[in-house]
Image (spheres, grey):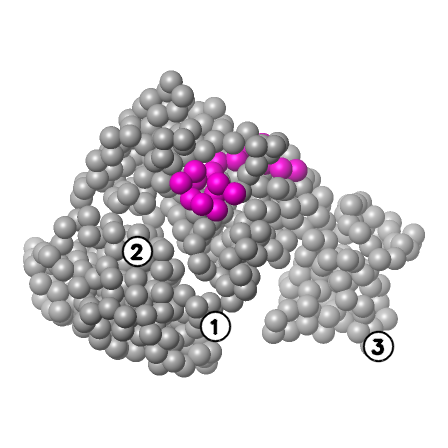
Amino acid sequence: MQLSAVLTGVPLLAELPSPLALTNVSGLEYDSRKVAEGNLFFAFPGAKADGRQFAADALAKGAVAVVSELPAPAGFSGPWLQVSHGRHALALASRTFFGKLDEKLQLTGITGTNGKTTTGYLIDSILRTAGKTTALIGTVEYRLGGKVLPAVNTTPESLDLHRILAGLDAIGGTHATMEVSSHALALGRVYGVGFHTAVFSNLTRDHLDFHVTMENYFEAKRLLFTGSGGPVPKCAVVNRDDEWGRKLVSERSTSEVLWYGLSPDAMVRAKNIHTGLQGLRFEVAFDRLKFEIRSPMIGRINVYNILAACSAGMTYQLDPETIAAGIAACTGVPGRFERVDEGQPFAVVVDYSHTDDALRNALAVARGLEPKRIITVFGCGGDRDVTKRPLMGKAACEGSDLVIVTSDNPRSEDPLQIINDIMVGARRTDTKTIVEPDRAAAIRKAIESANAGDLVLLAGKGHETYQIFAKETIHFDDREVAAEALRSFGFGKKAAQ
């Protein structure tokens, strides 16, 4: 494809020179280490490094030109194309280069603070049950047909996203379901993409280190519904019971809106809810349509996730039988209230809850199982929103009988300082609290403290298989550490046999 065609619709600050405009482009790259002959290189200003410093390397590897929102560095003599917004330029160029596949494929985008991953798995299960070949893009992993790819970000960079869509198209796929984070929306990773269906779960305090205010956080989420450089979604699926959800779309919205929730004014509602250790059972009511849902997932919060998924299925005109079968087939999501079972007489559960609202939800699910005691292990991430730390400390203590405060991913911060911030909220309650900065030791202490009938909740890291410190990242999986601790105390399915 010629360079002029690749950059169609990209606002350039200067006219594209005619000889360069006719140059063939073999691919796009934003990582100079991956540049190949004939590529167009995009240089972004970053928090840790300025992409312009790699421009000369990219040119030496055969890049035809460099695109950036900043001027060329001193001494650079190669083709330099300055644009008004670098990431928007990459998004638009990627969409064009790969053939505007969002116009061919059916895309579902899910945004919100909590529930995005579970809702994504549920929607993908419904679509696969309907016989569709799908892609799933989210926090835990990326799936392309039957292939599983590692997830670098919840929402990939625009170039990587369009590559995945191209891979889906190549295998005859038709539907892609993706989590769309507020960071991705604010940074333009989905800029120009047209979504068939946009889903909003809820909005609670998170990422204020990036967005600063809840209003900014909300406005970033809203971009999915107003069309970020692209058309507004054909359909909007919105949680009617969430106060931010009610502000999200207006009566003048050009999208077809499906409101879901438990309140009487929700269009897609859950009735006659039964929840227990074996899962959920309830009736979905929409207009005159009614059908029963059975799911192995537990907890009231998953009623909302299932309603969102059912509503998304309806936007694709799928029948109730297919939707219900897809929900039933989704047995669980890695790191989302995931049990660790070594035959012990108490429950051990791993959950990704890393906001105060998510932690309250997880504890509410745990309390609904009627354990004798709840023992919670959690920490907060370093280099992230510090304002939620005392809130999480308070939430953990209000919902637990014993709390062990530990490290999450400290990153560049002192783990003890993070714990001190958490303890400001924890001390507002009378719940017994133990401080153990070593996460493995904290998990072991929780399991050692558990008696028959108790529930141990390991919160914050969920599916993650690593722990990030200032100078190193180590392998760490709550599920593995818990299983090993259980076996060391004499439990273990294999040992019992």
State the extent of the magenta-drawn residues as a range: 231-247
Assign the N terminus to one quadrant of the image. top right
In the rendered view, would you say 312 is above or below 88?
above
- Residue 383: numbered disc: 1
Secondary structure of residue under mark 2: helix
Magenta run includes residue 209? no
Q: Position of residue 130 (x, y in %)?
A: 42, 28
Along the viewing direction, whichever of 6 and 318 lies nearer the viewer: 318
Q: Which residue appears at 50% of the width and 63% of the height?
A: 208
In the rendered view, would you say 196 is above or below 48?
above
Counting residues from the N terminus, which is met first, the one under dot 1 or under dot 2?
2
> Which of the 4 image quadrants contains residue 450?
bottom left
**Residue ID for mark 2:** 360
Along the viewing direction, whichever of 2 and 432 lies nearer the viewer: 432
Q: What amino acid is labelled 2 in the image?
A: Arg
Counting residues from the N terminus, which is met first, the one under dot 1 or under dot 3?
3
Secondary structure of residue under mark 3: loop
Assign the C terminus to one quadrant of the image. bottom left
**Residue ID for mark 3:** 75
In the rendered view, would you say 75 is above or below 226?
below
Does 177 sit left or right of 2 as displayed? left
Q: Position of residue 340 (x, y in %)?
A: 22, 57
Q: What amino acid is labelled 1 in the image?
A: Asp
